[in-house]
Image (spheres, grey):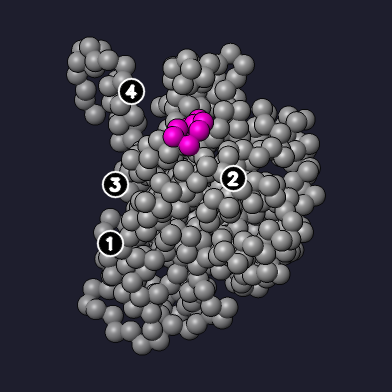
């Protein structure tokens, strides 16, 4: 890479940053996971197929043509030149989907707020995306952060990583769960974006007050490329300025976001831990409830009746909070203990009433937290059979992705399923996860990883 140094020095800071990020992205090509060069035709034989929805495995073959699944059948005549992969009796399943990721919240909170500039944070995010892919997650529904540029780089093949359904900066009221300003920061609207804190300046969160500002924030995220909209309607564990039981945003403010999302053919997902926050979200028309671990049974029943999706995080809530690197402040730990009290009952009620349950982790910040994100499988094991978790992390998660309709960044096929016309996101598993879900927690059990028809890992060669 040769740049004219004199020209660069004459450019303004914004252009310099853009050039630096482009050059860093290009250098990443040489170091990221290498995929096969071409999307050819591949036939998987001698496999037991979990199709993302059914409880039983099928003894069928799977033909991939380009980036799509062309045929699923016990009798497939392979076209000339087809690559044949004998699965050796292994389980073939869809690429997994993380329904509550934060791929750009990829270093510690302290580093994000005080030490990392935008370029450095972009590098950490690119590595986090690669880590997700090599863990078998071929798609992320990103529930907050400035992941638009990363998504474009991944889709262009500049970097290796999963598909991203970006929400963009989550929308928070002043002093809400997404208001991560320090005591020395001004307000982004009173004092201007340069004085309004790192989180809003780098578009990690978006502060909006009143229906008009919420409407504008929603439209801005949609303009940037959001597939769905994320809104905070209640207190959280990570934040310091909002009580856990605080209800955030008025009915009119939440409705403003829902209305704008619907006009673009998509939906609103809400962060809400408590019953009041979930009720406020349902009243306004939101259809994806993130967390919701301190609930009344009547509210859970209503979620089922409305067809809402429910995304609880068993691992974050139920692990030993003193060992969780995400929650090291005493305020955070006490909030997490409150959430943990309600978690088992909330999940049991969701099962009882047939709520559509997503699989998502909400793991973010540094590597010490992310390394354990697949512990969600282990912590859900007490509530769900292995096949139920497999359905959650593939087919059910794929359903909620499809709700973005006109804003769907990958509109040409289904995700989370093995069927004709679906995207070719495929895993081959060394052991049988239908017998032990913890198989999916170990990357060594992933014999093959295919995303969009390209093979990123293959131990069968």
Dot 3 surroundings within 10 Å: few (below 14), some, or many (20 or more)? few
Residue at mark 1 to residue at mark 3: CA–CA distance: 14 Å
Q: Position of residue 17 (x, y in %)?
A: 33, 23
- Closer to the N terminus: mark 1 or mark 4? 4
- Closer to the N terminus: mark 4 or mark 3? 4
Residue at mark 4 to residue at mark 3: CA–CA distance: 20 Å
Residue at mark 4 to residue at mark 2: CA–CA distance: 33 Å
Q: In the displayed structure, would residue 82 be above or below residue 219?
A: below
- Closer to the N terminus: mark 2 or mark 1? 1
Is 67 on the left-hand or right-hand side of 397? left
Q: Are marks 4 and 2 in contact (CB under 8 Å)?
A: no
Residue at mark 2 to residue at mark 1: CA–CA distance: 39 Å
* On-image quarter of the N terminus: top left
Residue at mark 2 to residue at mark 3: CA–CA distance: 31 Å
- Closer to the N terminus: mark 2 or mark 3? 3
Considering depth in this image, is 393 or 349 the residue closer to the camera?
Answer: 349
* Residue 39 circle label: 1
* Residue 17 circle label: 4
Q: Which residues are magenta?
A: 204-213
Residue 22 picture quarter: top left
Question: What residue sits 73% from the left and 50% below the top?
Answer: 294
Question: What residue sits 50% from the left and 78% below the top?
Answer: 48
Provide the secondary structure element on which disc 4 rests.
helix
Dot 4 surroundings within 10 Å: few (below 14), some, or many (20 or more)? some
Pointer 2 residue: 271
Q: Nearer the viewer, mark 2 or mark 1?
A: 2
Q: Position of residue 179 (x, y in %)?
A: 57, 29
Residue 57 picture quarter: bottom right
Pointer 3 residue: 156
- Closer to the N terminus: mark 4 or mark 2? 4
Provide the secondary structure element on which disc 3 rests.
loop
Question: What residue sits 23% from the left and 73% below the top?
Answer: 81
């Amino acid at each position: 890479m040769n740049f004219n140094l004199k020209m660069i020095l004459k450019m303004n800071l914004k252009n310099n940053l853009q050039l630096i990020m482009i050059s860093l992205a290009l250098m990443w090509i040489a170091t990221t996971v290498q995929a096969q060069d071409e999307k050819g035709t591949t036939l998987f034989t001698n496999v037991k197929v979990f199709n993302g929805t059914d409880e039983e495995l099928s003894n069928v073959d799977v033909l991939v043509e380009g980036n799509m699944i062309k045929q699923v059948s016990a009798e497939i005549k392979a076209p000339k030149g087809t690559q044949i992969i004998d699965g050796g009796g292994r389980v073939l399943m869809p690429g997994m989907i993380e329904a509550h990721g934060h791929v750009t919240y990829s270093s510690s909170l302290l580093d994000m707020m005080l030490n990392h500039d935008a370029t450095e944070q972009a590098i950490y995010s690119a590595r986090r995306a690669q880590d997700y892919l090599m863990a078998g997650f071929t798609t992320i529904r990103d529930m907050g952060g400035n992941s638009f540029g990363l998504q474009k780089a991944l889709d262009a093949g500049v970097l290796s990583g999963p598909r991203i359904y970006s929400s963009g900066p989550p929308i928070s009221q002043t002093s809400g769960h997404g208001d991560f300003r320090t005591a020395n920061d001004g307000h982004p609207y009173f004092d201007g974006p340069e004085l309004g804190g790192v989180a809003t300046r780098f578009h990690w969160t978006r502060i909006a007050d009143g229906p008009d500002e919420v409407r504008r924030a929603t439209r801005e995220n949609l303009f940037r490329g959001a597939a769905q909209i994320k809104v905070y309607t209640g207190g959280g564990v990570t934040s310091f300025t909002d009580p856990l039981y605080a209800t955030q945003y008025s009915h009119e403010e939440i409705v403003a976001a829902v209305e704008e999302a619907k006009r673009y053919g998509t939906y609103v997902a809400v962060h809400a831990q408590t019953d009041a926050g979930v009720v406020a979200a349902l009243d306004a028309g939101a259809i994806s409830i993130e967390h919701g671990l301190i609930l009344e049974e009547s509210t859970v029943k209503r979620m089922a009746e409305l067809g809402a999706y429910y995304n609880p995080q068993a691992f974050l809530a139920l692990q030993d909070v003193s060992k969780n690197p995400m929650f090291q402040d005493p305020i955070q730990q006490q909030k997490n203990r409150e959430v943990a009290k309600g978690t088992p009952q909330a999940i049991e009620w969701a099962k009882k009433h047939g709520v559509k349950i997503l699989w998502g982790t909400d793991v973010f910040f540094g590597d010490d937290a992310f390394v354990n994100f697949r512990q969600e499988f282990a912590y859900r094991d007490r509530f769900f059979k292995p096949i139920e978790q497999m359905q959650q992390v593939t087919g059910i998660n794929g359903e909620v992705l499809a709700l973005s309709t006109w804003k769907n960044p990958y509109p040409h096929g289904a995700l989370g399923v093995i069927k004709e016309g679906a995207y070719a996101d495929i895993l081959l598993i060394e052991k049988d996860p239908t017998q032990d879900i913890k198989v999916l927690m170990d990357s060594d059990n992933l014999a093959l990883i295919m995303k969009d028809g390209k093979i990123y890992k293959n131990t069968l060669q």
